[in-house]
Image (cartoon, helix red, strand yellow):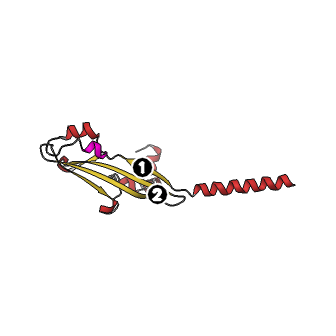
Amino acid sequence: MQGRIIGLKAALCGTALLFLGACVAQYRSHGYVPTEDLLSEIVVGVDTRGTVEDVVGVPSTAGVQNESGFYYVESEIRHFAYKAPEVVDRSVLAISFDEAGVVTNIERYGLEDGQVVPLARRITRTNDGDLSFIRKLFGNIGRLSAADLLGDG
């Protein structure tokens, strides 16, 4: 009987430890922002797109309009129990270029400089994507005639 009570207590303690362990926040880092040491090697007004890629690496994204700049983005995200993941830190490094592709400016931004902007892809939807398979199936029922079914048409 004594051994059974000790086993039950051990099982309860183990279960409690599992539940407490699940309540620990986990942090994950996504993306890449070059260090200050690497950025010190870039000379504004001298270096070009090619030299920036060689020194600090390929950017996370590039400016869409007139290839205006390179953007390096790093985010730290906290995952905690059942809650939705939360962005706790985001760094954006923007390197701007002129028309000739020469570096004109290097700027850093963080969460304190503005609001969180979710980084997402835009997807162009097609019109038939709004109709479900069942709606398409039932939509075709009225269009069929007996001749179509028998193959006489």
Dot 1 falls on a residue whose secondary structure is: strand
37 magenta-colored? yes
Direction from residue 85 to residue 2 in the image, left or right: right
- Quadrant of the image for the C terminus? top left
User: Which amino acid, by three-letter code, is at mark 1?
Assistant: Ser
Dot 2 falls on a residue whose secondary structure is: loop
Name the residue beneath numbered marker 1: 29
Q: Which disc number belongs to residue 117? A: none
User: Which of label 1 and label 2 is nearer to you?
Assistant: 1
Local packing at callout 2 (Cα closer than 10 Å; few below 14, some 14-19, many 20+) is some
Q: Is residue 63 above or below residue 110?
A: above
In percent of width and height, residue 55 lies at 26, 38
Q: State the extent of the magenta-drawn residues as a range.
A: 34-40
Name the residue beneath numbered marker 2: 85
Q: Is residue 54 above or below residue 113?
A: above
29 magenta-colored? no
Viewer-closest of 128 and 71: 71
Local packing at callout 1 (Cα closer than 10 Å; few below 14, some 14-19, many 20+) is few
In percent of width and height, residue 120 lies at 35, 53
Reading the chain from its start, which is encountered first: label 1 or label 2? Answer: 1
Direction from residue 10 to residue 86 in the image, left or right: left
Give the distance between the C-alpha atoms of the residues marked 1 and 2, in whole angstroms. 12 Å
In percent of width and height, residue 46 lies at 14, 41
Answer with the quarter of the image where residue 87 lies: bottom left
- Quadrant of the image for the N terminus? bottom right
User: Which amino acid, by three-letter code, is at mark 2?
Assistant: Pro
In percent of width and height, residue 94 lies at 25, 51
> Could you tell me if the residues under marks 1 and 2 are in contact, i.e. CB atoms within 8 Å?
no
